[in-house]
Amino acid sequence: MTAASGETPGTIDSPKGTLAASPAQIVEEFLGPVYGGRGDSQTGIDGGKLDLEWLEATYKEFHREPELSTAEEKTAARIARELEYFDNWEITTNIGGYGITAVLENGEGPTVLMRADFDGLPVAENTGVDYASKHSQLDAHGQRVPTMHACGHDHHTTSLLGAMRVLDGTRDKWSGTVVALFQPAEEASIGANGMVADGLGSIIPRPDVCLAQHVIAGPAGRVFTASGPVMTSSTTIEITLYGRGAHASMPHRSVDPVVLAASTVMKLQTVVSREVPPNQFAVITVASVEAGKANNVIPDSAKISLSCRFYDEALRKKCVDAIKRVVRAEAQSMGADRAPSFKFVGMLGATNNSEKVFSTVRAGFDEAFGTSESVDMEPWTASEDFPVIPKAFGVPYMLWTVGITPRWLWERAEKAGRLDIDIPTNHNPGFLPDLKTLPVGVRAAAVAVLSCLQQTWQRPADEGDDQTYRPTIPTDADIDAVAVETARAD
């Protein structure tokens, strides 16, 4: 088949969905006037046809009982119960563990996938709200740890469930196919890969575009978007340094791995400060150091764990090579008999938003929220496994962020120059979304999906009527190369 004018060779355009009004107008008719979560006079919101009591109660239920990556059994069951509300959607559970998809086919048009993650973190919550988590679970090492939704995944999940209600209730005003995907194990960086490897492509129709949103510390209700790299790649490295053990009173008989670890940690600081050009971004953080268990024993090994973040792949490879060089040289300088070992326990690519998806969604957000609340997104140094899904299908994608910090708190800290001190960020025990931002997450998700449904997207020309994507199943060696320790259920 020959590409039409303006298409990339070897591709065809997807059908274009039909909308009865603009995405913002369709959603506003269902939800009522926009409310940005601001603590000002714009507090009169009733949710329109969306039950806000249900929305808040659902969010609080997820928040009270977070579950660690790969151990989200109760959370997945709770999502599945919510999906019983949707008679017209095809629901599939237990994909790649606890992953879930819901598909609504609603006439001719593109297929748009919207993803939400739902795992929690091993963090003890310190927010003081009456719905704070008091839950705990066994972690990967068999230790009982407190759990918390310290990254807003409960907000993501609730927002997508709310957006599904908006889309389901406005089926007469749009056409196309919507895929709602609920993903486990994002914090372990394996959930998206797990769903793809478990046959996601044979379960859902091939999407034309993929979407995701993430809550962040920022003015409540403000929506941030950008094209290009918006989140970093992540490389996690566990390094074992080998020494020679001895009695603590006889350090001359040892090759002390504690001293070796200390010197290595300090030397690693020079990789970014002395080898990375000032106009490029790189972070190399030594996140943990482990050595010894007794005060009178010099151990025979030490372990350090590194979290590395980059936007540029070539720079990532350069810095990883530098890390290996520095660590090996430090071990040699201490007279270690055995070379250090390196285990790469997690690798994610950067999140690089499509220009076309950005321009499509941004136009919808500008209309829905106004240009003062739909603003440019600064690159974020966190990492995401969401791009694994669109990359598996070879389709464009976009991730945007939503601010969830109460406006009064943000403005007070900003005025005092204390944003970094007073405002809890993701993964902090005090991180807590303003409940008034839940309808903002719903509105943003619904507007973005509808915006993409009214566009055409390029598809492979030889696809024909079969839109099934069949990914290459990773080998055992592939899995071992990026293996991570994950939590297990109680």
Image (cartoon, rainbow, N blue to C red):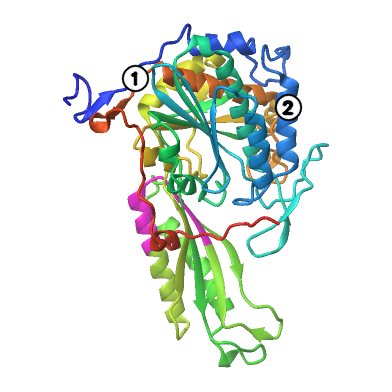
Instruction: Give the camera-side residue of 202 and 349.
Output: 202
Instruction: Give the camera-side residue of 49 and 231.
Output: 49
Q: Could you tell me the amino acid type at mark 1? A: Thr
Q: Is residue 25 above or below residue 231?
A: above
Q: Position of residue 46 (x, y in %)?
A: 72, 13
Q: Quadrant of the C terminus?
A: bottom right
Instruction: Give the camera-side residue of 156 and 207.
Output: 207
| C-alpha gap between disc 1 and disc 2 | 35 Å
| Residue 456, numbered circle | 1
The answer to which of marks 1 and 2 sits earlier in the sequence is 2
For disc 1, the neighbor class at 10 Å (few under 14, some 14 to 19, many from 20) is some
Which element carries disc 1, helix, strand or loop?
A: loop
Q: Is residue 152 visible?
A: no
Residue found farthest to the left: 2
Q: Which residues are magenta?
A: 306-321
Please give the name of the residue rendered at 45% of the width and 37% of the height, measured from the top-left corner.
203
Answer with left or right where residue 228 lies relative to residue 12.
Answer: right
Q: Is residue 79 visible?
A: yes
Answer with left or right where residue 181 lies relative to residue 316.
Answer: right
Q: Is residue 282 above or below residue 11?
A: below
When asked about the image quadrant of residue 4, the answer is: top left
Is 132 a magenta residue? Answer: no
Which residue does the numbered mark 2 point to in the structure image?
56
Please give the name of the residue rendered at 58% of the width and 20% of the height, measured from the top-left corner.
443
Q: Position of residue 164 (x, y in %)?
A: 58, 23
When asked about the image quadrant of residue 223, the answer is: top right
Please give the name of the residue rendered at 64% of the width and 78% of the height, measured from the top-left corner.
292
When asked about the image quadrant of residue 453, the answer is: top left
Q: Is residue 468 above or below residue 3?
A: below
For disc 2, the neighbor class at 10 Å (few under 14, some 14 to 19, many from 20) is some
Q: Are marks 1 and 2 in contact (CB under 8 Å)?
A: no
